[in-house]
Amino acid sequence: MPQAARITELDCLRGIAILLMILFHIVFDLAYFYNWSLDYLHGFWYYQGKTAAIGFMLVSGISNTLSRRPIRRGLTVFGAGMLITIVTYFYNPAMYIRFGILHLLGFSMLTAPWLAKQSALLLTLAGTTLLIMSNWTASLTTTSAWLLPLGITPTGFASLDYYPLLPWLGVVLYGMAAGKLLYPDRQPLWPSAATCVPIRTLSWLGRQSLLIYLVHQPVILVVLSFLHCNLSGKM
């Protein structure tokens, strides 16, 4: 959304999702690179990470109904996703990111001009249909990588981050349905939120979400490496 049209509570929710995402990636890095006994594939940490991702999807869906420049924003976000694809390919060709959360959100923004014209009921029904269909597509396999965006994967497929359109676009559509119902006049539900310092801080993080997403993992790795080297040297 343009700066003048931003809604503080949405930026705040996006900021919370950013913090949850950073926490999950710290846990992932400690387990993956430093062999800490932290299970990020099951239990609490798994659901904590998924909560962050679903938070991004829902807020992005709401914002899709409010944005006046969704195509431009979509190209930026999808382009950032492709940048991550290139970087992770050189880092780990066996598990590089081919359709991660930025690809998903960028795609949803590119389709927002059409989707935002639909009713909340139709968006909810479409989202539910995608979630149901994903139970079928998840059982399919293919020899081609071109169907990855639909949730149909080759045998042995693995990725550092994978959020296909089925089912996850369905969650974005739920967000769009919520946006139609909660913000029909594009006005905040909590006008006084902009005066609360903690809310303003979280909102600032939310406004920088794409930049933070792109740089947070290298920063985490540098900090963990520094701490590891210093703590190891004292033992």
Image (spheres, grey):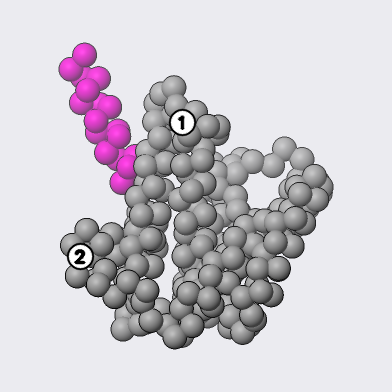
226 and 5: which one is in front? 5
Q: Does the magenta-highlighted stretch encompass residue 228? A: yes
Q: Which residue is mark 1?
A: 32
Mark 2 highlights which residue? Answer: 196
Mark 1 vs mark 2, CA separation in Å: 38 Å
Q: Characterize the magenta stretch by its predominant secondary structure.
A: helix
Can you give x and y, in whole percent of width and height, for residue 50 in the image?
52, 46
Amino acid type of disc 1?
Answer: Tyr
Give coordinates of residue 7: x percent, y percent: 35, 75
C-beta proximity under 8 Å, tags 1 and 2: no
Queried whether the magenta region covers residue 202, the answer comes back as: no
Q: Nearer the viewer, residue 42 or 88?
A: 42
- What number is the disc on residue 103? none
Query: Is 126 placed above or below 92 here?
Result: below
Residue 125: give x, y in percent of width and height.
Answer: 71, 68
Residues 52 and 155: in front is 52
Q: Quadrant of the N terminus?
A: bottom left
- Vertical comparison of 24 with 5: above or below: above
Residue in view at x 51 percent, y 38 percent: 46
